[in-house]
Image: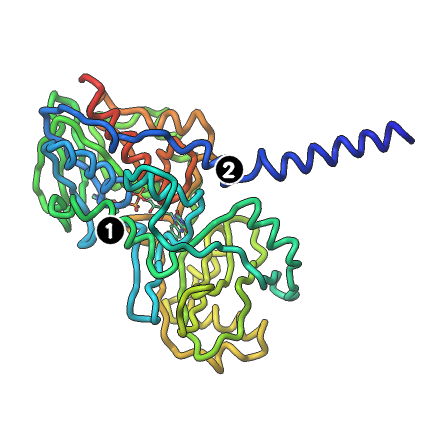
Amino acid sequence: MKIISISLFIILCLLALTISSCFKWAARAHKKIPDTTALDKSYQYEGKVIIVGAGAAGLAAAKVLEQNNIDYKILEASDRYGGRLKKNTTLADFPIDIGAEWIHSAPIILNKLKGKAGDQIEEELIPYHLEETYSWDGQNYKKSSQVQNDFMYKFMPESKFKNSTWYDFVNENIAATVKHKIEFNAPVTAINYASDKVEVKTKNGEVYTADKVLVTVSIGVLKANHIRFTPDFSEERKAAINRIIFHPGFKLVMKFREQFYPDAINCKVESGEKGFYDIAFKKEAQSNILGLLVTGNSTEAYYKLESEEEIVKAAIAELDNIFHGKASELYTGEYILENWGQHQLTMGTWTQAFQQKKSDLKILNRALDKKVYFAGEINDTYQQMGVPGAVLSGYHSIDKLLTEKK
Ligand SMILES: Cc1cc2nc3c(=O)[nH]c(=O)nc-3n(C[C@H](O)[C@H](O)[C@H](O)COP(=O)(O)OP(=O)(O)OC[C@H]3O[C@@H](n4cnc5c(N)ncnc54)[C@H](O)[C@@H]3O)c2cc1C
C-alpha cells in the first residue's frame, strides 16, 4: 500500500513538473530565442541577391541587406507585401488581422524581431487569458471550466496587439526600410542555378540575374511546383517537401449588432482546428466581431460549397443551431473571408516546424549549391512558430547566404 502511495506521489510530482515547466510552450520558445541575429552583425558582400517573396521572412532578410548596403531586389508575385500578414480597417472600429493574429511566443520576441535591445517592449499587448469558453461537438454546447482556461493560459501564455496588428508590426519595423526594393506582380516561375550566376524568370517573361537567391515562398507553393528549379530538387528534398503537413483552411470574420457569443467556442475536429472566437476580445472597441478559423479536415465540407456566401451561410446556420436563431437575427450582413488554403500564392494556412520530422527540416534548410537558399515559416530553426519563426528564419538564412563562400 505504502509503495503504491509513494509511486502515485512520484507520478503526480513528475506530471506537475512536466506541465509546469518542460511542456510549457512559451518557456520553451523563450529559451530558443537566439541571443543575436543578423541584425546585430555587419556584412561585406559584393554580389547581387534576389529575394523571392515579400512575406515576413523575405522582408526580414531584406532588412539585413538594406542595413549593409548590399545590392538586392525582392520579387513578389502579388500587388502587396506581407504575404500571410494582412489587415482590414473598414469592417470594425479597430484593425483586424486577416492572417496571423496571436503572438504565440513570449512578448520579448518583438524586440528581437525588430533588433531592439533590452527586455522592455514598446507594444501594448492583450494577454489572451480567456474567461468564458465553450466546446461544441455539433450537438452539445458545454461551458469549459475556468481551470481549463487558466491551464491553457499557463501552458501557452499567448497575447494579441491591443490597438494594432501583426501586419502593422512588420510594416513599421521591417518593411518600412525595404519596400522600395520590391518588384510587385512578378511571380517567379523558374530558377536556374546550373551556372555561376543564378537566373530567375518571372511569368511576365522578365529574366533577372543574381549571385545568390533566397526563396521565401510557402511550403504549399513549393509542394505545388509553382517554381521550376534547374537542376531539379533531389528526390530526398521532394520527399521531405511532400511529407510536411500544411493544412488548408480559411479565416472568416463576421460583424454582429450585439455580442451573443462567449470569448471562444472550440469545435470538435478530426484534424487541424476549428473555432469561433471574439476578435474584439479585450480590445478598446464597440464593434462586435466574431471570427471563425478553420484548418484541416473540417475545411473540406466548406470547400464543397459553391461560393463565399454559402460558406458564410453555413457558419451563421451553425451559430443559429447553438444560439437558437440569434446569429441570423443579429448579423449585419458584413463579413471578410480570406481563403488562404486555396490562395495560389499561399496554398495553405500555417505549419509548425517543430512538429515535423527533424531530418526533413534539415533537408529543407539546406542550400542548393551555395547559391539558392530558403527561408520562411517552415525554415524556423528557433521553434518560435508563425511570424516570429518566419522573421527569424529570414535573418538566419540571409546570414548563411552572405557568409558561405560559393
Ligand atoms: C489564417 C492564418 C492565421 C495565422 N495565425 C497566426 C498567428 O496567430 N500567429 C502567428 O505567429 N502566425 C500565424 N499564422 C502564420 C503566419 O502568418 C506565417 O507563419 C507567416 O506569415 C509566414 O511568413 P512567410 O514569409 O514564411 O510566408 P508568406 O507570408 O506566405 O510569404 C511568402 C510570400 O511569397 C509570395 N510568393 C508566393 N509565390 C511566389 C512566386 N512564385 N514568386 C514570387 N513571390 C511569391 C507570396 O505572395 C508572399 O508574399 C497564420 C496564418 C494564417 C494563414
Name the residue located 19 percent from the left edge and 17 percent from the top edge: 405
User: Which residue was labeled with disc 2?
Assistant: 27
Q: How many marks?
A: 2
Residues at marks 1 and 2, CA–CA distance in whole angstroms: 27 Å
**Residue matched to label 1:** 171
Q: Quadrant of residue 93?
A: bottom left
- Residue 99, x across and y down, in percent: 35, 55
Nearer-the-camera pick, 190 or 60? 60
**Which circle, 1 or 2, is nearer the viewer?**
2
Secondary structure beneath dot 1 equals helix
Q: Which mark is residue 60?
A: none
Ligand 1: does it lie within 8 Å of the C-beta at label 1? no
Q: How is the image coloured?
A: rainbow
The quadrant in which the N terminus is found is top right
Residue 112, quarter of picture: top left
Say which residue appears at 56% left-offset and 44% top-offset: 155
Kind of residue at disc 1: Asn
Amino acid marked by disc 2: Ala
Q: Position of residue 10 (x, y in %)?
A: 76, 30
Direction from residue 158 to residue 73 in the image, left or right: left
Q: In this orientation, which residue lies closer to the viewer: 405 or 157?
A: 157
